[in-house]
Amino acid sequence: MVLSQHAEAPYAMALLESGVDGVGYLLKERVGDVADLVEALSSVAAGGSVIDPKVVQELVSRRSAAERSPLARLTERETDVLREMATGKNNAAVARALFLSERAVEKHISAVFAKLDLSEEGDANRRVMAAVLAFLDSDNAGAQHP
C-alpha cells in the first residue's frame, strides 16, 4: 500500500508492473476517514487492489499522450529499423542486424520517414531527425520506443 501526496504515474506504473493483486496507491488528501483507510488496507491484504481515481486518471493521461506520439504509428519492424538507424548504422548494417534485405530496409525507412512527417526538403538529415524524435519522445513521454 502506498500513501502519497502526489499522483505520480511513473511510481504507479512501477508498483503495478508485477500485477494488481495486493496493490494499493492512495492519495493522502483523499483518505479522510479512518474507516475508509482500514477498508482499503483490508482489501489489499486480501489480495485486492485499491487505486485512487486521480492516480488512474494520471495513468490514462500519460498513456494517451504516448499514443498521440508519431512514434506510436510505427509498426514493430519499423521501430526496430529506427532503433538500428539511431545507432548510426547504414542500410546494409541495419539489414544485417535485422536479417532483412537492403530493399526491405529501404522500404521500412521510407515508411518511418512518411509516418514521422520527415520530408526530403531542406538541409536536415532525415535519419538524424528520426533518431532525435525517437530520443525526445522516449525521454519526455516515457514511451517504450527507441
Image (spheres, rainbow, N blue to C red):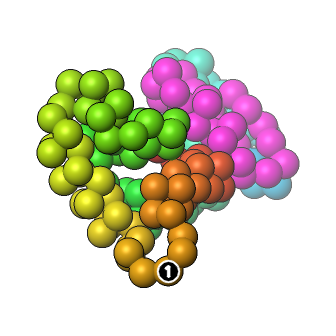
Q: Position of residue 111 (x, y in %)?
A: 25, 60
Q: Is 16 left or right of 9, judged from the image as shown?
A: left
**In the rendered image of this protein, does residue 52 appear above or below residue 49?**
below
**In the rendered image of this protein, does residue 114 appear above or below residue 83?**
below
Query: Of residues 8 and 100, which is closer to you in this image?
Result: 100
Question: What residue occupies the far bottom of the structure in this picture?
Answer: 121
- The residue sitting at 58% across, 37% down in the picture is 13
Can residue 86 be seen in the rendering of this structure? yes
144 inside magenta stretch: no
- The residue sitting at 54% across, 31% down in the picture is 16
Using the rendered view, name the quadrant where residue 41 is placed: top right
Q: Residue tagged by mark 1?
A: 122
Q: Secondary structure at mark 1?
A: loop
Q: Position of residue 113 (x, y in %)?
A: 35, 64
Using the rendered view, name the quadrant where residue 1 is placed: top right
Magenta residues, as a range?
1-26
